[in-house]
């Protein structure tokens, strides 16, 4: 018995069979295995392998070798003795050429023969039972109801339900029954019963209030998404009405959108303004309020402008950078502390800061005497003249001098030579004491770094203070580093006990000027030679009692590494160039030439 509605087999043979063709219901002849629903074709399922291997495998074309080579055998075409008998009995039709059917046609013929046999048996059974007859209304439409006509039960299968009748397993590998198990398909229904009514859908009551729960969704929603499978509507919600948007969610979305648009507009406006408009700037030289602004070392123009803007000096860093970029080469703004007014124009701020004298700093230059340093501190700090000098004299032991520095009571100023040349930034907290301590510390650190204590004896000097003294003489008489090394050689050669030319006198004009607190080139030599003072090298032998200025690094390094050229004399030819000689005769000749030029210069 074949399975109705399964596979590609033929329709039931008898027109009165309940499943015969379904013609007239949808206007299309229903193929076996397809049940129309709503006028649309149903999905066609692949052929169940129920007819495969129903019979003992045997080559189909044993009696026809020409077909055996032409068509390779497949499992679905393998037939048993039953197929062979069908061929022998002549039940399979031949094609127009009189040949046997092809493999596909053969399967069709087998199915036709097998289906005919099963249909005959089913027909006999159906004749023995009441046959369902469709009931039509007055207009000829099927009402979906059936009535059963009595029938005489005849035959061996009388009284058996054709839909539960299953064929007896007569062949090996026969497919199992798909209608009598737990997972069986529903048995086919008559045409009048095939139009299934949709299951009623329970309406879900919408809450009267649209308030949000603490979780962000409506009451009853665990996760608030409502993504359950439903009737095809969005989110699978039952009841038909879509889930309403929360008013709070809309408000949050609106705030986010406004924030993004507003923020983008704000930054876009600032970018366009900074890119295409002139930088904001004040006008004039500023208000009366003065502030101190410190510019660190290595600062760029924009960084300087931002520091000034933060202090309230300029309106924008860009305006200052633009104004400073117009400065001529060699007039760069230095790092340091500047006293500036608030709300200055960028050009005014640049003008003040490009003038080194406007820096709120004290610069100790190389070879600068202490008297000049004291005066500069008094002026920058607004102190009365002589205040810093008095503090230096009174607090000399508390300023941090090394132990070897203050060992001679004849020193004019124990701090001479220990106010190290550098630039010192001033602030509101700066005092004469703090500045002097800082300068002494810098000098002590540098002298320790150069190791002058250990090199004093190597140079034939008595103590480290004499090293500093020689360096101060070199710095006072020389003009450049090459001059410094030759000048140091002159000092060391004149200090030798074998010097019988100058009798160990240095005869440096700078020492006489130091005592007199002056810087004169033309002075009375005889008066200088007769002036008795421990610092006057025209009168005393050897080195002065202490340094005569604050030597710089070049003079210090030259003192520690002299030229060794045997130089004994020197003379300044034009005030800028120094000529060195080894003999007194050469020196006398150069000195006479210098005196002659001086007379011509003075008109005498």
Image (spheres, grey):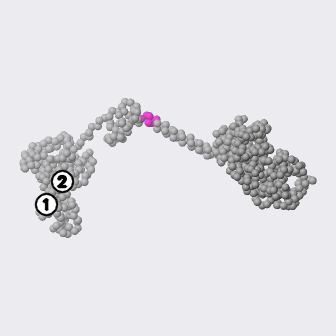
| Residue 52, image quadrant | bottom left
Along the polypeptide, which appears first: circle 1 or circle 2? 1
Q: Residue at x 26, y 49 (%)?
A: 42
| Residue 383, image quadrant | top right
Please, which residue is most extreme toward the right here? 604
Q: Is residue 248 magenta?
A: yes
Q: Residue at x 80, y 53 (%)?
A: 477
Q: Is residue 7 left or right of residue 267?
A: left
Residue linked to disc 2? 175
Which is nearer the eye, 357 or 258?
357
Q: Main secondary structure of the magenta part?
A: helix
Q: Residue at x 36, y 31 (%)?
A: 207
User: Contact (CB < 8 A) between labels 1 and 2?
Assistant: no
Disc 1 is placed on an element classified as helix
Q: Nearer the viewer, mark 1 or mark 2?
A: 2
Please, which residue is most extreme toward the bottom here? 66
Residue 128 x %, y %: 9, 47
């Amino acid at each position: 018995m074949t399975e109705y509605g399964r596979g590609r087999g033929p329709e039931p043979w008898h027109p009165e069979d309940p499943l015969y063709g379904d013609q007239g219901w949808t206007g299309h002849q229903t193929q076996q295995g397809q049940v129309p629903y709503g006028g649309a074709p149903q999905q066609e399922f692949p052929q169940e392998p129920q007819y495969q291997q129903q019979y003992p495998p045997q080559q189909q074309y044993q009696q026809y070798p020409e077909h055996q080579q032409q068509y390779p055998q497949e499992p679905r075409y393998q037939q048993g003795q039953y197929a062979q008998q069908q061929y022998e009995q002549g039940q399979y039709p031949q094609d127009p050429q009189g040949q046997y059917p092809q493999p596909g046609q053969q399967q069709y013929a087998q199915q036709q023969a097998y289906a005919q046999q099963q249909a005959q048996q089913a027909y006999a059974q159906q004749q023995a039972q009441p046959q369902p007859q469709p009931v039509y209304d007055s207009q000829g439409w099927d009402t979906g109801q059936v009535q059963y006509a009595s029938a005489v039960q005849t035959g061996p299968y009388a009284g058996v339900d054709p839909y539960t009748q299953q064929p007896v397993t007569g062949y090996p590998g026969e497919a199992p029954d798909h209608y009598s198990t737990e997972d069986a398909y529903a048995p086919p229904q008559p045409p009048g019963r095939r139009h299934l009514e949709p299951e009623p859908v329970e309406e879900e009551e919408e809450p009267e209030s649209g308030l949000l729960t603490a979780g962000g969704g409506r009451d009853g929603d665990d996760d608030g998404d409502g993504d359950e499978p439903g009737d095809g509507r969005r989110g699978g919600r039952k009841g038909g009405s879509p889930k309403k948007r929360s008013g709070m969610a809309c408000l949050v979305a609106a705030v986010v959108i406004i924030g993004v648009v507003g923020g983008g507009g704000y930054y876009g406006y600032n970018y366009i303004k900074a890119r295409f408009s002139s930088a904001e700037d004040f006008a004039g030289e500023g208000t009366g309020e003065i502030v101190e602004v410190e510019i660190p070392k290595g600062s760029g123009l924009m960084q300087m402008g931002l520091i000034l803007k933060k202090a309230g000096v300029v309106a924008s860093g860009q305006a200052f950078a633009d104004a400073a970029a117009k400065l001529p080469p060699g007039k760069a703004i230095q790092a340091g502390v500047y006293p500036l007014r608030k709300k200055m124009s960028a050009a005014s701020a640049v003008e003040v800061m490009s003038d080194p004298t406007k820096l709120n700093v004290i610069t100790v230059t190389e070879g600068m005497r202490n008297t000049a340093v004291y005066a500069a501190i008094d002026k920058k700090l607004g102190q009365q003249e002589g205040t810093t000098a008095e503090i230096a004299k009174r607090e000399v032991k508390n300023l941090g001098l090394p132990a070897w520095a203050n060992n001679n009571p004849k020193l004019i100023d124990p701090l001479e030579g220990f106010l190290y040349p550098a630039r010192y930034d001033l602030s509101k907290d700066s005092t004469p004491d703090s500045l002097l301590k800082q300068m002494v510390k810098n000098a002590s650190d540098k002298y320790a770094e150069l190791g002058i204590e250990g090199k004093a004896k190597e140079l034939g000097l008595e103590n480290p203070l004499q090293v500093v003294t020689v360096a101060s003489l070199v710095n006072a008489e020389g003009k450049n580093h090459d001059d410094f090394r030759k000048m140091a050689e002159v000092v060391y050669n004149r200090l030798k006990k074998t010097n019988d030319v100058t009798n160990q006198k240095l005869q440096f004009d700078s020492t006489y000027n130091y005592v007199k607190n002056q810087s004169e080139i033309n002075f009375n030599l005889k008066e200088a030679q007769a002036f008795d003072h421990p610092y006057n090298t025209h009168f005393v032998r050897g080195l002065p009692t202490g340094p005569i200025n604050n030597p710089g690094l070049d003079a210090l390094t030259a003192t520690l590494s002299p030229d060794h050229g045997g130089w004994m004399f020197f003379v300044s030819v034009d005030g800028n160039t120094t000529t060195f000689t080894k003999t007194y005769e050469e020196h006398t000749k150069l000195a006479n030439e210098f005196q002659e030029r001086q007379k011509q210069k003075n008109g005498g």
